[in-house]
Image (cartoon, coloured by chain):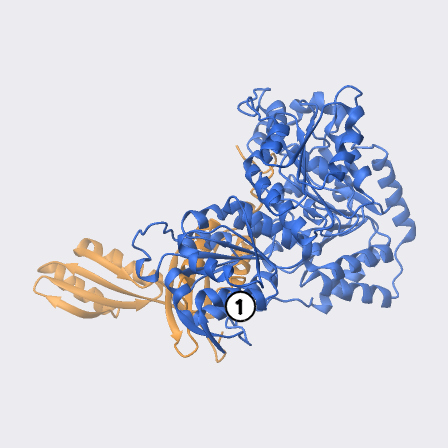
Chain colours: A blue, B orange
Amino acid sequence: MTEMTGAEMVIAALADQGVEHIFGYPGGAVLPIYDAIFQQDRVNHILVRHEQGAVHAAEGYARSTGKVGTVLVTSGPGATNAVTGLTDALCDSIPLVVITGQVPTHLIGNDAFQECDTVGITRPCTKYNYLVKNIADLPRALHEAFHIAASGRPGPVVVDIPKDIQFAKGSYFKPKEFLHKGYRPKVKGDLDKIKEAIDMMAAAKRPLFYTGGGVVNSGRAACDLLRELVKLTGFPITSTLMGLGAFPAADKQWLGMLGMHGTWEANWSMHDCDLMIAVGARFDDRITGRLDAFSPGSKKIHIDIDPSSINKNVKADVAIVGDCAHVLEDMVRLWRASAAIPDKKALQAWWDQIGTWRAKNSLAFRNSNEIIKPQYAIQRLYELTKDRDTYITTEVGQHQMWAAQFYQFQEPNRWMTSGGLGTMGYGLPASIGVQLAHPNSLVVDIAGEASVLMTMQEISTAVQYDLPVKIFILNNQYMGMVRQWQELLHGKRYSHSYTEALPDFVKLAEAYHAHGIRCTHPGELDEKIREMIDVKKPVLFDCVVDPAENCFPMIPSGRAHNEMLLGDAATRVEDAVTEAGKVMV
Amino acid sequence: MNTAATTHYPAMTTAEQVETRTLCVLVDNEPGVLARVIGLFAGRGYNIDSLTVSETEHEKHLSRITVVTRGTPMVIEQIKNQLDRLVPVHRVVDLTSGGPALQRELAMVKVRGKGEHRVEALRLADAFRARVIDASPESFVFEITGASDKIDSFINLMLPLGLVEVSRTGVVAISRGPDGM
């Protein structure tokens, strides 16, 4: 026990939790904590340009390292600006501890300057939150916040600390036991259920692994065990947007991403399989499409650490609640021990069928010698960066889907994207968090020109801290995904999806003291990407692409997996979307 | 417009029967815990028919929330799982599906009247084993406990006899037999 102020306790707890970097923005209600930061060198503070950027940066840091990301913001607008990031982290299960300043306790509820009901506002967008009204409760709240954020299904935790508590003196300690006795996430799966699953897998004729972000969250061990189990069984595997990298894209058992913009083979396999093994995935609506036509002939095994994810959208035949790594470890062990031999003949027939779907070459696009196709740009980016230690973040929209389709992820934690919430403006600040965690790696934000303008000011943060992030903007001058839906669903009435006054991104880069590159022709793409990689500064890369390109394959709203559209079918797309489907975008 | 056959989010569960369930939720008695529970119901569109909450184990700082809710079996399962994953929630017990259970409510019923009506109100109260806890020359306050439908019946009978107002606790419930939750 050491006597110190609340502000000093914040630093002590962060340091004790092994926090190296905290992203933040000062303000009146956190000045004592900033004063404490000034007088120490254990925790490094990164000054962002907007609180939303701080949270996304912390998400990028967390997602690329597996550690808890941390944020420090002031009361009122500081806290409300953080809300988008908190919601994003909750949707994608990213562990964060976000410390917010609050007006002094005697002013709470008094409509004081820069007061807001932070715990009230953040209750539905955090895994848990605290308002610390007594200095004696502060050490416990800080340490518990880290425990809650990182354990079970990870998520963001807010600790709201009134200014008088930051000044108050108390005893700092690291609690030995956790106060919330009711919070005990189940990590070991039920062995009987796992045995049942193994028996079903041994008997399956058309099996399929469907994996998600939970595998990545569970850690490296879970990814290795997944790879081992997929190899052992010889089953095909597909993954959600969030799960990319858990299984190597170069492997022949990999079918590509599934879902609304997934591959033909992945979605048809989902539809026609007789056994689906869902690991750390939550049957999101972008995955399932039309629910009553979702994989109608399959039994479903669902492995998830969060019981509320099971039977939420799709009934599981065997539900295994537990951490992916623990459950997969048992599965690998039991599969090896079981005498059951899979039906080789049936599996071969299944692979043959998948081969015919693959032959469709569903990601094919018509390339051009005149104009840069966005898919081509990502293909070239991949080819020129694949042999480097590369991390990719994205914004949200068409470019995000093309990145998921065309950038080949071989390892987990290399792909940072806003999946659940779909937050435009995520990628640039996230890349800052990633670069900070991996200073010698290449970090590329595959961006759209509309998304990146939402958090563009964070390029200033990158410049300040010499973080050479590469912002690779696929500039089609549209909010591309919005335009695509308007083309397909709203009679080509492009209502407000065209940006008529875009900045000159090269000049903008220069204004921020970053490096700007513009590329308008496919012939100069490779050379300019190499320049981007070689420049040891933050880069804004304005890649001027075909403004009319659409993202295919695509499952239109209201349709099932076996009703997906391919690129060359684009002319028939309007007929394919039903009236009722239009409301489901 | 959103028919099950044509949208991304078919109303899959509406084909199932809607059931009423009584859930008991044991929670840490801490600031904001009730807001978490009812915020969950509001935010996810679940129904609350009745809600009671009070500290039940002072030394352990535990409160018991009894909530009567409605939904299809799949929604009820979601409600239980969503409640269970809240950090301050210790246990969620479904007293409707988990074996025989007792459910009671307490109501205070104020009736105003004179003459025949006043006599009739008193006579009916006696039949329902309602106690008079306050009286004036032209009014009674009755205290009645029982299952919710008994209280509903009593209130309906008081309506023409000069019912002024009702205050009800909402449902509290406990399982039968020797075992605790």
Whole-percent x, y for residue A413 in the image: 71, 52
Callout 1: SS: helix
Name above or below for residue A428 compared with residue A412. above
Name above or below for residue B132 compared with residue A315. below
| Crowd band around label 1 with a 10 angstrom C-alpha radius: few (<14), some (14–19), many (20+) | many
Q: Report which quarter residue A470 is drawn in.
A: top right
Left or right of residue B137: residue A175: right
Residue under numbered circle 1: A12
Left or right of residue A412: residue A15: left
Q: Label 1 sits on what residue type?
A: Ala
Whole-percent x, y for residue A561 in the image: 71, 38
Name above or below for residue A168 compared with residue A532. below
Q: Residue at x 10, y 65 (%)?
A: B136
Left or right of residue B7: residue A356: right
Q: Residue at x 64, y 33 (%)?
A: A448
Whole-percent x, y for residue A447 in the image: 65, 36
Q: Residue at x 24, y 59 (%)?
A: B166
Q: Residue at x 59, y 66 (%)?
A: A17
Front residue (pair A307, A47): A47
